Amino acid sequence: MAALGYFDLALLILVLVPVVVLPWEGHRTPDWLYLLLAGSGLAAALLRGGPAALAWSCAAGLGCLLLTSAMVTALRMQTRLRILTGGQLKLMAAGATWVGMTGTLVMMSVAVLTLFLLAAFQQAGAVRRRPDASAIVAVAIVSVAMQQHLPGM
């Protein structure tokens, strides 16, 4: 059963690569890639833990989507800053299906903290180029998944 974690991690990385690479090439990430990411995360949860894990994985994805959308909306109303786009919100929610409830909180903390830190540096003039939030979110997803699946991490 431990080998299933390695296959889960490999599939996660395989599905995340196009989501991160397409915006670099000037293309918009299609919604079906986010659906593929979320669907494969739900399937992995079902294989690992049955219907209960599937339900928790669905709850993690929906909770992440609702919470990050509310946070981004509140921030946008207060400061007029655009921290995350709709695609990046979908990426976080789809990634949440892979890492479960606790992993979602860790993933969101890492991603949001990194984005705010980079925004502060950017506002101070230390960073000229706008950071790629999709890559930051993808790294947060993979790092949490690696911690969950690889022994000794």
Image (tube, rainbow, N blue to C red):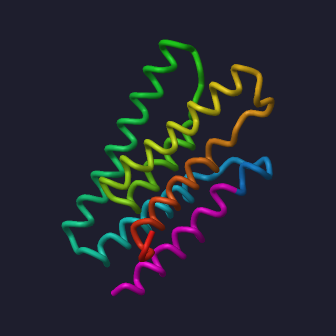
In this view, the residue farthest toward the top is 78
Residue shown at 51% from the left, 60% from the top: 143
Task: For the N terminus, give its image quadrant.
Answer: bottom left
Q: Is residue 6 magenta?
A: yes
Asked whether residue 148 is drawn in magenta, I would say: no
Task: From the viewer's perspective, tell me whether residue 110 is left or right of residue 126.
Answer: left
49 left or right, relative to 84 = left
Quarter of the rendering containing residue 80: top right
Q: Nearer the viewer, residue 117 or 136?
A: 117
Q: In the image, residue 76 lies at what x, y percent?
A: 51, 19
Q: Residue at x 72, y 55 (%)?
A: 22
Nearer to the camera, 145 or 69: 145
At 40% from the left and 49% from the top, the residue drawn is 106
**Magenta part, dominant SS:** helix
Range covered by the magenta-colored residues = 1-20
Using the rendered view, name the quadrant where residue 116 is placed: top right
Seen from the viewer's position, the closer of residues 63 and 119 is 119
Looking at the image, how many numbered discs can be counted on the residues?
0
Could you say where residue 53 lies in the image, as x and y percent from the top left? 24, 66
